[in-house]
Amino acid sequence: MNKKLVNININFDSLFFPLSIDRCSMTDPSFFVIADRFFEFSLKYNFKYTIFIIGKDLENPEVAARVRSWAEAGHEIGNHSYTHNPNLGSLSRQEMEFEVMKSHELITNCIGYEPKGFISPSWSTSGDLIEILMKAGYIYDTSVFPSYFQYFVLMKLMFLTGQKHPNFHPSFGLRRDKLAFFFAPRRPYFIGPESLIKKKSEGLLMLPLPVATALRIPCWHTMYFVFGKHLMNWLLLKTIREHEYFYYLVHPKDLVNYKTDLLDEFKNKYNTELAVFESLKMPIEEKTSYMDQALSLLAASGRKFVTMRKMAENIIQQSKL
């Protein structure tokens, strides 16, 4: 492929993941009415998503059937860990391996083949995690956030979650990858368990979150809710121009209709906990407008839409030339 590539990927952080509820006892609208809004965009702009799934969600048969249908339609399914522990890269080797491989097993059983891409919750990584992924046959990972903005993201999560949900509360002090916020490469690179920055084209391909300029301003859809439309459009265009390989990260909450998607009893019970999602209560019309604006800019760039796996395979092939 000589044409520059772009991917749209969904970190499928279902609405239930930060809540202490049984995923099999309620229907999470993320996988149904909310997901349908995302697929309307994929039809409009003619692309396939890469969708990183939390393994535990697949223990709900209705959800598993839905995810299977996405894979059958040509969308890539990736691994986003089993329980979405935001301190994944700081866990013991045994705990970390369970989080990766339990989700790996559930995804494989669901779609009929093994996932080859991974992203860690809260971009929490370590050499042990890299080694586990390599042993499991993964070809790419996107678990590096090469920007000091990660400090602000973690502080926000710590402030909003407090100690109410220890499974979602990030611990900055335990992280083994703090230097990556400042010094990790801004372009795709290869990595091994002994080093977070391995220059040679061997090991696991790392696709860091796209950032703009030497200031390392991160570019993913959440920034529309932080910067506003005009500044974010500028950032998106600038970041696209700076990256040969570009991917755009979105979340289910980006297209939640708070008025109609959630039952009142659910909102009343979990209102405080749901505050972890940025702009959850923003009108759906505005959210839809933001998504359409971003995708139209990406389509107008002339890039070829591909899955993350196709992008990774292209990079690996080019590295061998």
Image (cartoon, rainbow, N blue to C red):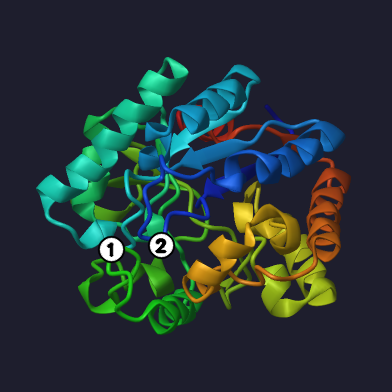
Q: Please give the label number shown on residue 122.
A: 2
Q: Please give the label number shown on residue 216.
A: none
Q: Residue at x 45, y 60 (%)?
A: 185
The residues tagged by marks 1 and 2 sit, at their Cα atoms, a distance apart of 8 Å
The percent coordinates of residue 304 (x first, y second) are 75, 34
Q: Amino acid at mark 1?
A: Asn
Q: Residue at x 41, y 30 (%)?
A: 116
The percent coordinates of residue 66 (x first, y second) are 57, 28
Left-right relation of 50 to 199: right
Q: Is residue 124 above or below residue 116?
A: below
Q: Is residue 48 above or below residue 15?
A: above
* Label 1–label 2 contact, CB within 8 A: yes
Mark 1 neighbour density, 10 Å: few (under 14) some (14–19) many (20 or more) = many
Element at label 1: loop
The percent coordinates of residue 168 (x first, y second) are 35, 65
Please tell me which of labels 1 and 2 falls first in the chain: 1
Write down the residue under mark 1. Answer: 87
